[in-house]
């Protein structure tokens, strides 16, 4: 057993971790918009989605339940000024009926697709309880579901803070 562990350690030292370096990860982040720009974009998407759902299936009365929160990013811990956010949780205190769920998902797919999200994957689909999730190229994900209440929540991917983004260098706030 000790030989196997020693051999594994030697291979790791010789080959390296094989993952991207911090320099590569920073370069990747500089190619993305900053976190403030993405937050604005995603909030616009959520507003558009809530409005479409309310207009076409409602009226639905959405309330902001939990405020936005911020977090660091695993895999980017050695880079300063990187964060992800969970945008406000939006709730309609009521269920979208089963007969309207497919239309609700079609609306969500159309609206979020225009913002770069892929088709949603079903996480729950039983009478009275439905839930989907979708992601974009930056690692953001939204969840949209209905049971007793209807919820919409979005987690961003990892982005540089505006002040840390090279595209904003020299700009005054």
Image (cartoon, rainbow, N blue to C red):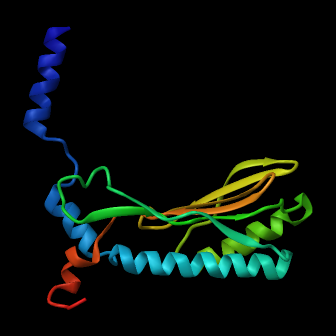
**Furthest residue to the top?**
1
- Please name the residue shown 32% across and 76% down the image: 34
19 horizontally vs 154: left or right: left
Instruction: Mark yes or no: residue 23 visible.
Output: yes
- Please name the residue shown 69% across and 69% down the image: 63
Image height of 49 relative to 18, above or below = below
155 horizontally vs 37: left or right: right
- Quadrant in the picture for the N terminus: top left
7 horizontally vs 69: left or right: left
Residue 102 is situated, as x and y percent measured from the top left of the image, at 82, 64
State the image quarter where residue 134 is shown.
Answer: bottom right
Foreground pick, 71 / 13: 71
104 horizontally vs 77: left or right: right
State the image quarter where residue 95 is shown.
Answer: bottom right
Foreground pick, 5 / 133: 133
Residue 145 is situated, as x and y percent measured from the top left of the image, at 72, 57
- Please name the residue shown 16% across and 57% down the image: 22
Foreground pick, 167 / 135: 167
Residue 125 is situated, as x and y percent measured from the top left of the image, at 78, 49
**Furthest residue to the right?**
99
- Please name the residue shown 25% across and 89% down the image: 173
Residue 53 is situated, as x and y percent measured from the top left of the image, at 77, 75
Q: How many marks?
A: 0
Instruction: Mark yes or no: residue 115 visible.
Output: no
């Amino acid at each position: 057993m000790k030989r196997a562990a020693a051999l594994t350690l030697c291979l790791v030292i010789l080959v390296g971790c094989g993952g991207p370096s911090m320099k590569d990860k920073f370069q990747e982040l500089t190619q993305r918009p900053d976190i403030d720009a993405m937050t604005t974009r995603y909030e616009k998407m959520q507003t558009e989605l809530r409005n479409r759902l309310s207009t076409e299936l409602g009226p639905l009365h959405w309330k902001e339940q939990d405020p936005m929160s911020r977090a660091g990013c695993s895999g980017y811990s050695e880079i300063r000024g990187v964060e992800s956010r969970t945008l406000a949780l939006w709730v309609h205190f009521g269920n979208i009926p089963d007969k309207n769920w497919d239309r609700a998902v079609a609306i969500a797919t159309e609206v979020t697709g225009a913002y770069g999200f892929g088709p949603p994957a079903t996480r729950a689909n039983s009478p009275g309880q439905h839930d989907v999730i979708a992601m974009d190229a930056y690692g953001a994900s939204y969840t949209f579901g209905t049971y007793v209440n209807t919820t919409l929540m979005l987690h961003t991917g990892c982005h540089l803070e505006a002040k840390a983004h090279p595209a904003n260098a020299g700009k005054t706030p």
